[in-house]
Each structure stands twice: as C-alpha cells, then as structure tokens.
Image (cartoon, rainbow, N blue to C red):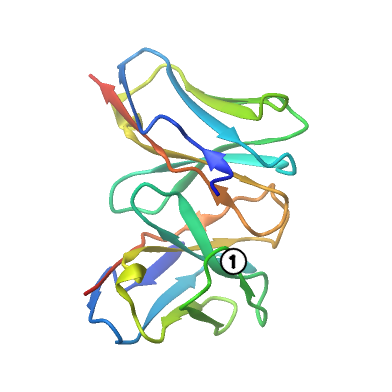
Amino acid sequence: NAGVTQTPKFQVLKTGQSMTLQCAQDMNHNSMYWYRQDPGMGLRLIYYSASEGTTDKGEVPNGYNVSRLNKREFSLRLESAAPSQTSVYFCASKLLSGGAHNEQFFGPGTRLTVL
Amino acid sequence: DQQVKQNSPSLSVQEGRISILNCDYTNSMFDYFLWYKKYPAEGPTFLISISSIKDKNEDGRFTVFLNKSAKHLSLHIVPSQPGDSAVYFCAANTGANNLFFGTGTRLTVIP
C-alpha cells in the first residue's frame, strides 16, 4: 500500500515549456487535490476533484489544468510554464468529498523550478 | 488574504518539556481544524483535528485546544521528543473541499 505517489520528484523547466505532474493513490479515495507550497506561505489549493469525472478550481488555478484520469489518478498540467510557478507541488487524496472529518493524505511532493 | 495565521515561524523546546504551537483564524465559518506535521522532503501528515463544537481533543501526547471566541487554536505536545522536530501546519475548512493552511511553525526539540 503505497498511499499517494507523485512523479517526478524534481523537474527543471524553461519558461514556456509544458509538463504534466502525475499523481496516483491506491487507497480507493474518491477525492483528490493539487496544492502548491511557496516559501513563507502555507499550502494553497490549485484544483480538486471531488469524485471521478469532476474537477473544480481552488484558490490559485490560473496557469494550470487538471485531468481526473480515473479514480486512482489525477494529473496537473502546466501548458506554458512561468517562473512564478516555481514551487513545491503536493497531491492529496481523501476518502469522501467535503465531510471535514476525514483528513487528506499527501504525497511526497514535486519540486519544480522554472527558469 | 491569509485566513489562517501562524505568527511564530519557529519554536525551540528542550526535550521533555511542553511545546505549544499557536494558530489564529479570521473566518468565523470554519468548522473543522486540523494540524499536520511535515518532515523535509516529505508531504504533510495528519496529526490531530478538532470540530468547532468541541474545545479540546486529545490523542496521546498531542492535545488541541480551540477558543472560538478568540478565533484561536493551539497544539500542545507533552512531553516533547526529538522526533517531534518538524514543521507544523494548522489548517481549517468549512466542510467543503478547500482546506486553508497556515504558513507553518518549525519546531526544534533539543535533546
């Protein structure tokens, strides 16, 4: 039982390049999330998927797209990377949507640098 | 605008003593609060939570206190151990999907 896995662990991009961050969970959770963490700031929600087939914007969605490929996988795409997207990206999953009483489980993160 | 604030970026405590980490929030609609612990190069891991209908929740060495009138919560760790050294994030939500995080407090437990 690996929990939440993310690939890659590290990535360096040039401005304007595109890439997709991958996330998978093996806990049969319904909801999945993408966060970014910047120095001096808490984690901020980019997009989430409350259940398979649905996606919604979070607090900071600009410059990103997501795909809920199936129940296990939720990817985050940067179409044209910008230096402001340099950050650590975390994927998380939760058993049920909403329902504050069930906590989110986080992956190890992807450290992205955009030059 | 930061809805969840952790005003102490760091805290150092001697092993065996109590660690108190503080968190303030501005949104009175928050009804659930969580603490996460994060080690370097790892994702945050859930530690303890509290519903807004309670003022205290205890789990082993960890106790969270909630003061709704002051919009303040705190995490107490007793006794503190070197393995507790990590960054601690306070988080809150309204029962919806957006979890709001504080900026974190780095706890160092000195052996």
Callout 1: residue from which chain?
A
What is the x, y in percent for residue B25? 61, 37
Q: Is residue A68 above or below residue B20?
A: below
Q: Is residue B101 above or below residue B48?
A: below
Is any atom of residue B46 visible in this view? yes
Question: Residue drawn at (55%, 85%), measured in percent from left and top?
Answer: A69
Name which quarter of the figure residue A99 lies in: bottom right
Question: Residue drawn at (33%, 44%), measured in percent from left and top?
Answer: B39
Mark 1, secondary structure of its residue: loop
Is any atom of residue A28 visible in this view? no
What is the x, y in percent for residue A70? 58, 83
Q: Which residue is mark 1?
A: A58
Which residue is more in the foreground, B56 or B70? B70
What is the x, y in percent for residue B65? 62, 24
Q: Callout 1: few (<14), some (14-19), or many (20+) C-alpha neighbours within 10 Å?
A: some
**Quarter of the image containing the C terminus of chain B?**
top left
Question: Residue drawn at (64%, 60%), measured in percent from left and top?
Answer: A95
Q: How many marks?
A: 1
Going by the numbered disc 1, the residue's amino acid type is Gly
What is the x, y in percent for residue A47? 56, 70
Q: Is residue B77 left or right of residue B51?
A: left
Q: Is residue B72 above or below residue A9?
A: above
Which residue is more in the foreground, B20 or B17? B20
Q: Is residue A52 left or right of residue B89?
A: right
Q: Residue furthest right?
A: B53
Question: Residue drawn at (47%, 78%), measured in percent from left and top?
Answer: A64
Q: Residue furthest front?
A: B1
Which residue is more in the foreground, A52 or B88? B88
